[in-house]
Amino acid sequence: MLSASKSRTMSWVLMALVFVAALGYGATADRGPRSDQERAAALSSSIACPQCTGQPVSESNAPIAETIRTQIKQQVDAGLTDQQIVQVYVDRYGEWVDLNPSRSGLTGVVWIAPFLVIGVAIGALALAFSRWRGPAETQRATAADAALVQSAQEDRPGEPS
Amino acid sequence: MNQFVGAVAIVLSLSAALIAIPMLAVGIHQGRPQLLRSGARYAWVILAGMIVATAAMQRALITRDFDVLFVAEHGSSKTPPLFNVATMWSALEGSILLWGLILAGYLMIVVRKFRHRLDDPLVAWAMIVMFVVTAFFLALMMGPANPFKSFDAPVGFDGPGPNPLLQNHVLVAFHPPMLYLGYVGFTVPFAFATAALVTGRLGEGWLLETRRWTLFAWGFLTAGIVLGAWWAYDVLGWGGYWGWDPVENASFLPWLTGTAYLHSVLVQERRGMLRVWNLSLVCATFSLTILGTFITRSGVLASVHNFSESGIGVWLLMFFAATVLVTVGLIFWRGDRLRSPGTIDSPLSREGAFLANNLAFAAMAFIILLGTVFPLIVEAFNGDRISVGVPYFERMTMPVGMTMLFLMAVAPVLPWRKAGTELLKHRLEWPAWTGVAALVLSVVVGARGFAPLLGFTMAGFASGSALRQLVLATRRQGWRGLVGRANGGMIVHIGVIMLAVGFVASSAYLRQGEFEMTPGETVALGDTEIAYESSRVITHSNRIEEEATVVVDGQVLTPALERFTESGQLVPAPATRSTWTEDIQVAVLVSAEGIDQTIVLRATRQPMIFWLWSGGLVMLVGTALSAFPGKRQRKPTDPASAPIPVDA
Amino acid sequence: MTEPAPDSGRKAMSSLQVVAAAVAVVVVAFIVLLATRDVQVNQPSLALVGQNVPQFSGTSYDGKTFDMNSVLLANRELTQADQTWTVINFFASWCGPCRLEHGDLTRLDTEGAACPTRLVGVTITDSAENVEAFFEDLGGEWPVLVGDTSGTVIDFSVLAPPETIVVAPSGLVVAKFIGAVTYERLVEVISC
């Protein structure tokens, strides 16, 4: 008879195997290159409708948005790459129609800054933890302290408001 | 007449606020409790004024009194009755009036609740802060956002009515008031936090007093945001419910800091720690509601919600500046008092998990704020116009969301102070199996893709953990195992998990198609059959509805295209077939024309949309249950920190 | 009872104050940023200026047709003095500034400029009936393309009416005006 701890460990090992197998299968099965429809949909979500207030063409009923969606489908069918399709509209209207901010230049900061800030925060937390550990381990109470707490708990005057 | 009454009521309220503030200040300074009590009573006058002003505005809207400029600009004899009431908050001035009304209501409730403690300087300072905030909004109503300006209406004048998108769905009557009940509700904990800082009394007292306020405000804000998403889903026509629009993001930020606060306040209660952080969170939440209002109303960031751009932006920005700088200044000044004696013994503990939770929420808030204002930063630096849209937000918030789900799974089983791995292996076993089961189930029903599958696993893991807590609690305490802070919190977690699952599934597996159809034609979107039968035209008072009858997988739906007569604007009115597993929404893009009555129909299929709205409902139920007083009252002599060894 | 050492207490206070001061600086910078922004509107594009005019064609509300390429081809056959400039006006009947500039466009159509000029309009999200009513109301007799003009609107990087593009006989785009134009500004750029 396996001890509870050992059978639990085996349960976890089995779980990990099932997890890796299922996730591996689900993530890679019928995972060919993205279908044309998916590419067109993704592109429509990343190109802004020029006459709207920041919405992608996939989220606008304006005729111009409709036309751009149709054009995107045609361009995907014609074999243009995602980059080329976005460039068509950036050339016409400017950088602002690309809702995916560029990775280079000043704009690229928006991609890096969160990681930097989170890194600094984790660093600060780690520093705080080490500082908390330090003094706590050197503090010890005396018997007199314990007696003081004991007597305070005994003659409590009742619930304070 | 309406406009006179309304204007006088606003003046009355503002005067009351301006009298009360110095009265309370003098009362505190000179230690005169009688002044403090009478000063606080002015809240009644403010509330009376706001009720009268709101009643005057509603009367003007309902009777279509075009002598009031606001009604002339936004009201119309053709607007259906329900939407007339909601017209009040369909534009700037009425919205500020609504804000003022809700703020006056909260003010009165605070005065009532603390009526036996009005002579306590901390309560008096909190009242001063609330009166100052109220005076600000009342001053806005007297100047830049005056709802009762007069108008010389020519004979036979009829107003244009509110924006068509604000008069074709019933949720217009619920989403803004809920949202405001949330935003404005955060004023109360903020007032008490400021009062605690000013008086230097930073013990646990004020925290417990205002916990329920924060919870209710948070609950209303959650309801407001979910209702907004539902409304968008129901009227836009492409199945979207969250667009990472600047105004949507602005409403989400205080929700994130508020949620972080609701968690880290537990650490303060138990261990006496994180006091500065909690104060900062409360003040940040309130400040972010003001920032959010600024972003909505100033037009600095283009958004679909910019239905009112006006000069009010500069005032809101100044108020935001004052709020933040005063808060930071107070924390700077009182820093010495805020040192807490407790420490956190181990990162692998409930405290550690809450710290990680706060880090995750702060990270998400930072990402969303950065992404939203980044175009302004770039433009200020080099004049370039760039956009930061959906692709950025989705990609950056996804890992943070996964982390939050993971923490939701692990934190409830962690004990305070320190946890051992054996304990974790034992307690997390069943939740982890639930997670794996969810993964296998997802793969079996056909879900593919690493990110969504990982999301479903985490969701299963987290729900297993929450259910485990609830089962243990109900076994111990019967029905009481479902109420109280911890158990209600687990139910809220389940609601969040349902919402997350709905979000992941509907985003990852959306399928859309546009079809040109003649009557009698059937098309297929994936496995779904859509048949177009006929069209007809219905005339209403304010619009012409071009309705199509469509059969989707056996269910008859009537999507329509509404043409508002006044503005000529075309607004879609999609129809949805909703089940627990998937939603199919059909929207008319081009209504029937020509002899052959062809229409262009857009069909969108998204799995598990219903989980979004039901998850939101579960969150609200959990919030209500959470507010139930728990049976276990904390004793003042309960240890606040880990015991240190005693030298015998 | 142990007390925190006075030194560590003072150091901790100042670190909190440092953080508070840093937060205040960031917030002030943020507020200055927001205060100096204008209302955000989509930025019109002048990318077309200096490029060749995109090909477009269509049917006018009165049934006539127009084709840009035909105009350019015809220009090649003509002497320099006879070649026509083309002024393309993107407009809509519901647009206020379009009404304002209509008088100037009519003047260009009737009086002409230094060189032979032809005017062609392109509607944005409008119907033939509205355009006809507009022109009946305010006058003007040049072809105005109606129907599905979105492709042309995109090709010309047009955001919102009115926008006017001036094309030289060779097909080179010499100017793009955003907003209502005046007769003077138009004839200024037309030179033979």
Image: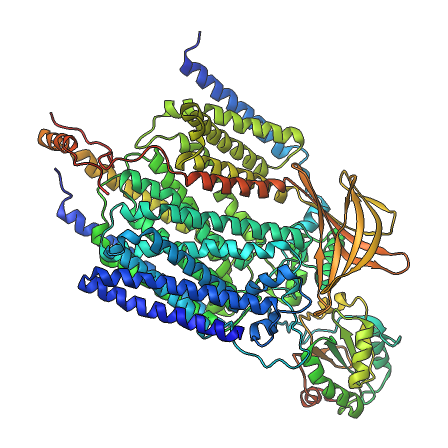
Tell whether B87 sits left or right of C18.
right
x 64%, y 61%: residue: B81
Q: In this view of the protein, which residue sits in the foreground, B472 or B337?
A: B472
Q: Is residue B145 visible?
A: no
Coordinates of residue B227 in the picture (x, y in percent): 57, 50
Residue situated furthest right in the rendering: B595
**Image vertical order of residue B298 relative to residue B199, above or below:** below
**Image vertical order of residue B300 relative to residue B116, above or below:** below
Quadrant of the snapshot with the C terminus of chain B: top left
Picture quadrant where residue A80 is located: bottom right
Q: In this view of the protein, which residue sits in the foreground, C157 or B500?
A: B500
Q: In this view of the protein, which residue sits in the foreground, B334 or A137?
A: B334
Q: Is residue C138 visible?
A: yes
Coordinates of residue B539 in the picture (x, y in percent): 78, 62
**Image vertical order of residue B353 relative to residue C83, above or below:** above
Coordinates of residue C163 in the picture (x, y in percent): 69, 77
x 56%, y 26%: residue: B437
Residue situated furthest left in the rendering: A144
Tell whether C170 sits left or right of A136.
right
Tell whether B142 sits left or right of B436.
left
Q: In this view of the protein, which residue sits in the foreground, B280 or A64?
A: B280
Coordinates of residue C44 in the picture (x, y in percent): 62, 72
**Image vertical order of residue A116 relative to residue B617, above or below:** below
Tell whether B556 sits left or right of A119.
right
